[in-house]
Image: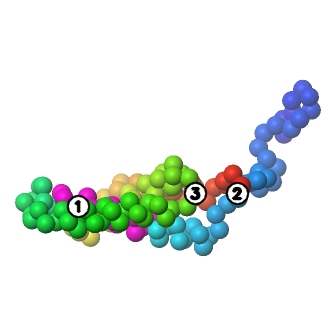
């Protein structure tokens, strides 16, 4: 423990989060994670379908479900909890994981060891952001 010349304590708190902060309960974390999964899937589908049209010569009609999927994506973003910056940062970790799963399941490309390590790091970062203490409400 460190002390200022005036005798005040400095340094990290002695116990738990500061007064006036809260952490997200585990059930809410699971709900948020599920919402992140749906949001990522809607975003990926909404971007993948135009890719098929532009790069693989598929029908322009794919733009209709793509637009619907991106609309769903935008709506799902409004359902996420807390401040937009924190939510988008945490969502990014889940997006990376879903994108790698998409690469494997849809494009039939087996993820490399570094892909999987990267996904693990991204999900760990997402967990830290979402489980961390927040200013009280």
Q: Residue at x 37, y 62 (%)?
A: 73
Query: Residue 52 in the image: x percent, y percent?
Result: 15, 61
State the separation of the CA atoms marked 1 and 3: 29 Å
Q: Is residue 97 left or right of residue 132?
A: left
Query: Residue 137 in the image: x percent, y percent?
Result: 70, 57
Q: Residues within 10 Å of mark 3 (few under 14, many from 20)?
A: few
The answer to which of marks 2 and 3 sits earlier in the sequence is: 3
The answer to which of marks 1 and 3 sits earlier in the sequence is: 1
Residue numbers of the magenta segment = 36-51
Residue 40 lies in the magenta stretch: yes
Residue corresponding to mark 1: 48
Q: Is residue 18 left or right of residue 4?
A: left
Question: Is disc 1 placed on a helix, strand or loop?
Answer: helix
State the separation of the CA atoms marked 2 and 3: 10 Å
Residue corresponding to mark 2: 137
Query: Residue 68 in the image: x percent, y percent?
Result: 28, 66
Q: Which of the two residues, 135 or 104, is positioned nearer the viewer here?
A: 135
């Amino acid at each position: 423990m460190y002390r200022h010349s005036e005798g005040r304590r400095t340094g990290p708190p002695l116990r738990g989060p500061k007064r006036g902060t809260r952490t997200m309960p585990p059930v809410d974390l699971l709900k948020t994670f599920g919402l992140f999964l749906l949001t990522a899937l809607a975003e990926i589908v909404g971007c993948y379908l135009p890719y098929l049209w532009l790069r693989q010569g598929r029908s322009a009609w794919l733009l209709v479900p793509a637009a619907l999927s991106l609309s769903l994506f935008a709506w799902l973003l409004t359902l996420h909890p807390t401040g937009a910056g924190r939510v988008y940062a945490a969502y990014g970790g889940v997006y990376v994981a879903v994108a790698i799963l998409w690469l494997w399941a849809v494009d039939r490309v087996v993820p490399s060891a570094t892909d999987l390590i990267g996904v693990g790091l991204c999900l760990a970062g997402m967990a830290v952001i979402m489980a961390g203490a927040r200013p009280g409400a």
